[in-house]
Image (cartoon, rainbow, N blue to C red):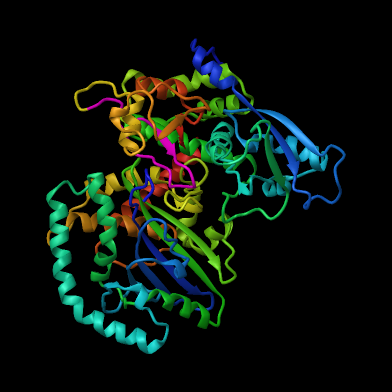
Amino acid sequence: QRPGQRPRGYLALTEIRPLSSNDALVFFGRQEQETPWTNLDNTVGSNHFSAIPIDRSPAATAATVGADVDVDAAQSSEEALLDELDEINEDFEDIEAIEAADLSTLEASNPLCSLHIEEELLLTAKMLTCSPLCSFALIPSALKWVKDTMEDDYLSVTYHIVYSPSFQVPVLYFNACRSNGLILPLEQIYESLVPNDWRTGVRNAGLSGGISQQDHPVLNVPFFYLHPCETVPLMETVQSGQNFDESGSFLESYIMTWISLTGQAVGLAVSTQAASEAALATVKAKVAEGVENQSQD
Amino acid sequence: MAIGIAPYNPIAKVIWDGSIPILFSDNGVDLPAKSPNASLLIEAPRCSYLSQLTSRVLHHFCGPAHGPDEEAELWFDYNGIPLKWHYPIGLLYDIHGLQAATRSSSESPLPWKVTAHFRDFPADKLIRRQAVDSCQDYYMAMIKEADYLRNGSTKRIMNMSKADQMQLWDGLQSNNYDQFWSMNHKLLANEGTIAKSLPVRIYLPDNCPIIQEPVSPLDNDGQPRTLGQILHMAVPDLFPLDDGESPTAATALIHGVVPDLSASALWIAQNLSYPDTFLHIVIVLH
């Protein structure tokens, strides 16, 4: 490790959306520094992958969970995928127990302390797979296999959740490209990713819209991102107005709420029960307020 | 619009007046015919941005008729590396000219020889420009982030009037020290309170992820931290505390000069920041 480097983890999700249908495949996992998510041939070490086939309707089907998979053992045949899946399903119960212990340790200290939130993002991969999402484990070469066998043109959308030490909130970075690999420009991002009823609100947020480009803090290449300025007051509002479910952890609810609030704005189709309708309503009200204030300037 | 005179600060003025001579050449491929004036020499303020030179470069190489499409496609490289137009020119030179120079040639680094490209914008490496708006957008995002670090809330910057924002931006665009600093001074003064955290970005060689971690200007005993202590917290291997005033492994550069590591970090941040109110420190390895 070179001097000055510190491990910077982030959560990565890649969605493959065939243009012709409403289905999508979501691959997601934890990623460490210096290994570009999209360059699977260079993936080093083990990563946690889950693939979540989803449809656009809110209902999600039953869940299975992924575990750490040794990338070097990856094979590309479908049979191997299914074998891998069976093995992983057997480990499910063990993983659940481990995660419960991890979460409570983190919560013992201040869950929003910056030191812990970054670690917590790394655990989110496991947390989300415990939620009622449909998921099954794939090995990374499967992503390539899926892309190669996809007959229709598709949109590949990559979401990274990176913790911002400055604003002390998670920040959503994302890029989208078609099967030819060309990155979508801003206007097409609005058209393809931002749901219709969010479009005006997102465009009018902040100085020149809620979506801009910035250098990815770890990869140092251009990514679109949602201005965290908007997130900070939103999350404060949500926190103060929310009674999170007593049986769940506060931190899990915080992150799930954050993901569904910010993800919704840019089409991150992760359905979750942890974010309540009230939280979403609060956000929409804030966005509408922002639109009103903007037009009064 | 009342501009006002900036408070007397000879150090800020010297930094504002700092410049880099840049020799622009075209890449020999994009333009249809060899232009009669093959190169363009510009004395560019260190505190300005490459996007402010767009018109002059296009005018020189392509003639007066150019529109937003041409402006959006223009990009620059040095030694094959696309130059980030959203970094101040002084920072770009410190990174690509000074930080990289110790490895290679004996050739004088100035004038800085930059190649202009008019096509094939590398959208996978450079943020897209939609003319001046993207630059202002990015600049204001940096201002917001720095202000949040200083006072821990977005309220002040979100309530900044459009007129004030434009005064900052116009002052920067027209290289008007008084116009810019009479507004910038208010941001840095932080309403008389000591900043909660200092907006600092530290650049290591070889495209290492930038170190940007909130650091308080005061230590746990309420004493002001020195620049050396801040660097030690960020990169302890390169700036060990017992090295005294001349660290052996690396040198820190701000605006191309080596600062005194025993100086108060807060003072350095208030006087040596760039117009985006961040302190950009480039580390050169020995």
- Magenta stretch, main secondary structure class: loop
Instruction: From the viewer's perspective, tell me whether residue B164 is left or right of residue B24.
Output: left
Residue at the spot x=47%, y=65% of the render? A38
Quarter containing the N terminus of chain B? top right
How far across and how far down the image is residue A280, in percent?
A: 32, 57
Q: Farthest residue in the bottom direction?
A: A79
Inspect this view and state whether residue A168 appears. Answer: yes
Left or right of residue B39: residue A177: left
**In the picture shown, does residue A84 fall above or below B279?**
below
Residue B278 is at least partly visible in this image: no
Residue A86 at what x, y percent from top left? 26, 85
Residue B190 % position (x, y):
37, 23
Residue A225, above or below A84? above
- Residue B214 is covered by the magenta coloring: yes
Left/right of residue A139 with respect to residue A63 in the rendered view: right
B148 in relation to B14, above or below:
below
Quadrant housing residue B24: top right
Report how many numbered discs are placed on residues in the image.
0
| Residue beneath the point at 68% across and 40% down | B114
Q: Name the one closer to the observer, A236 or B284.
A: B284
* Of residues B27 and A192, the one drawn nearer to the viewer in this rendering: B27
Question: Going by the image, does A123 lie left or right of A229?
Answer: left
Is residue B172 placed above or below A269 in the rendered structure? Answer: above
B278 inside magenta stretch = no
> Residue at the spot x=52%, y=40% of the render?
B138
Picture quarter containing residue B265? top left
- The one nearer the camera, B151 or A296, is B151
Question: Which range is magenta?
Answer: B198-219
- Please tell me which residue is depicted at 21% across the width and 52% down the height of the picture: A242
Q: Position of residue A192 (x, y in %)?
A: 52, 64
